[in-house]
């Protein structure tokens, strides 16, 4: 049996992309799978061997030191293929390559562009740091056996470093069996929802204001960052329309989607967001509800091609409220858009199609 090992110093053991999709898919297709996770307890789940190592909590220390315990565990496992999921682990990846190992770098996000929007980095320092990080990441990425990316945009960047047959995009699309449309459209409440990390740059203020302006409930699930942002939002007039559920598990998320008539995704027009493919867009579609999302060219192409929602200026709460009212006032149109979104996921945007790309890459590397 071929042994493979996925490595992370940042994500948790239940990470949807790493564990539920990639690791479980590989295990079900005959691989012996190990998943090294900082801060986890060692155990076996769905035939995946979780290997816990020491977690370093401080952000700076994690960048400098977190690679070593992960690397030591990886060497002990002695796999045929290693698959790393954090830029901080590229140092460990290079060392594994020097030991003659096959190593895949999974780039979830466009890190240099992401740095340009990090609030904890002084704004004057961001452009310089972004350039330095890109050079370091590129130098180490060139030494990898292959690179997996979460979006075609990131793939284009790394195709400048490795032959195109060693770089592939594996979208973070939903698992069809996890999210299914409910047959309660005629009776479900007129409500919008948002599920995910709750940050200012992900449009929480615009969503709360739009819920107030449109006078419909906003079902909100996730964790506020920073925590003080919750208090700021509670002081807005629109908060009276918010039903805040906190962090939800997968079953509770499914129930919230079944109580919603539309899903909101209003990320601000930052460089790291405009070319992203957020899983929530496709989860709303999989649930059979229309989307009201940021009018980015990439997203507009998907939404307009599928006729599954409305694109708006994410910084204009009045425009968001107008789109929400349009769907809320036309239940038949909203239902039709939701059905089209579900059909698009079934035909094009499901994990099944991406699983094949990952399995084909592994077969090529072996």
Image: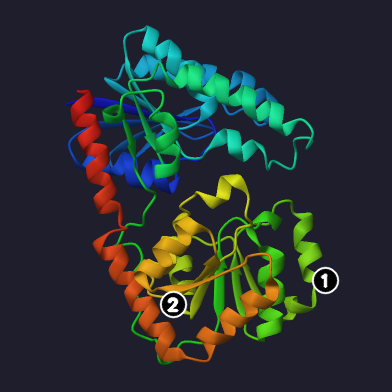
264 horizontally vs 154: left or right: right
Asked if disc 2 and disc 1 are in contact, CB closer than 8 Å, the reply is no
Where is residue 179 shown, x and y percent of the image?
36, 66
Residue at the spot 39% in from the left edge and 78% down from the top edge: 337
Where is residue 143 shown, x and y percent of the image?
40, 16
> Circle 2 is placed at which residue position?
258
Where is residue 28 shown, x and y percent of the image?
21, 43
> Circle 1 is placed at which residue position?
235
Q: Vertically, is 309 above or below 167? A: below
The image's mark for residue 26 is: none
Residue at the spot 57% in from the left edge and 45% down from the top edge: 272
First reached walking from the N terminus: tag 2 or tag 1: 1
State the image quarter where residue 65 is shown.
Answer: top right
Q: Secondary structure at mark 1?
A: loop
Task: Name the residue nearer the viewer: 99 or 142.
Answer: 142
Residue 193 in view in this figure: yes
Residue at the spot 45% in from the left edge and 45% down from the top edge: 15
Give the position of the C terminus as an image quadrant. Answer: top left
Task: Name the residue nearer the viewer: 198 or 1.
Answer: 198
Give the position of the N terminus as an image quadrant. Answer: top left
């Amino acid at each position: 049996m071929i042994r493979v090992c996925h490595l992370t110093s940042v994500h948790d053991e239940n990470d949807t992309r790493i564990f539920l999709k990639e690791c479980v898919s590989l295990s079900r297709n005959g691989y012996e799978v190990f998943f090294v996770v900082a801060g986890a307890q060692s155990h076996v789940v769905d035939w995946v061997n979780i290997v816990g190592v020491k977690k370093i909590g401080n952000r700076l220390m994690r960048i400098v030191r977190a690679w070593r315990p992960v690397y030591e565990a990886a060497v002990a496992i002695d796999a045929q293929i290693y698959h790393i999921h954090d830029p901080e682990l590229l140092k460990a990846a290079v060392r594994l390559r020097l030991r003659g190992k096959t190593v895949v770098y999974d780039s979830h996000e466009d890190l240099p562009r992401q740095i340009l929007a990090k609030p904890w980095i002084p704004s004057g320092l961001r452009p310089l740091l972004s350039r330095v990080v890109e050079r370091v990441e590129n130098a180490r990425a060139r030494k990898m056996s292959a690179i997996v990316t979460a979006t075609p945009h990131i793939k284009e960047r790394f195709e400048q470093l490795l032959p195109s047959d060693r770089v592939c995009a594996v979208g973070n699309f939903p698992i069809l069996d996890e999210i299914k449309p409910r047959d309660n459209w005629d009776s479900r409440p007129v409500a919008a929802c948002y599920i995910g990390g709750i940050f200012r740059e992900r449009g929480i203020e615009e969503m709360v204001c739009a819920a107030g302006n449109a006078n419909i409930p906003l079902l909100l699930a996730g964790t506020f960052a920073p925590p003080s942002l919750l208090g700021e939002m509670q002081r807005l007039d629109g908060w009276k329309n918010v039903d805040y559920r906190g962090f939800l598990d997968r079953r509770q998320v499914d129930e919230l989607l079944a109580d919603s008539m539309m899903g909101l995704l209003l990320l601000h027009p930052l460089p790291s967001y405009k070319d992203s493919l957020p899983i929530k867009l496709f989860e709303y579609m999989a649930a059979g509800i229309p989307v009201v999302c940021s009018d980015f060219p990439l997203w507009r192409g998907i939404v307009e091609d599928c006729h599954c929602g409305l694109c708006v200026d994410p910084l204009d709460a009045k425009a968001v409220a107008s789109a929400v009212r349009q769907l809320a006032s036309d239940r038949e149109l909203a239902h039709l858009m939701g059905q089209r979104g579900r059909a698009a996921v079934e035909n094009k945007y499901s994990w099944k199609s991406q699983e094949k790309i990952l399995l084909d890459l592994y077969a090529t590397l072996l």
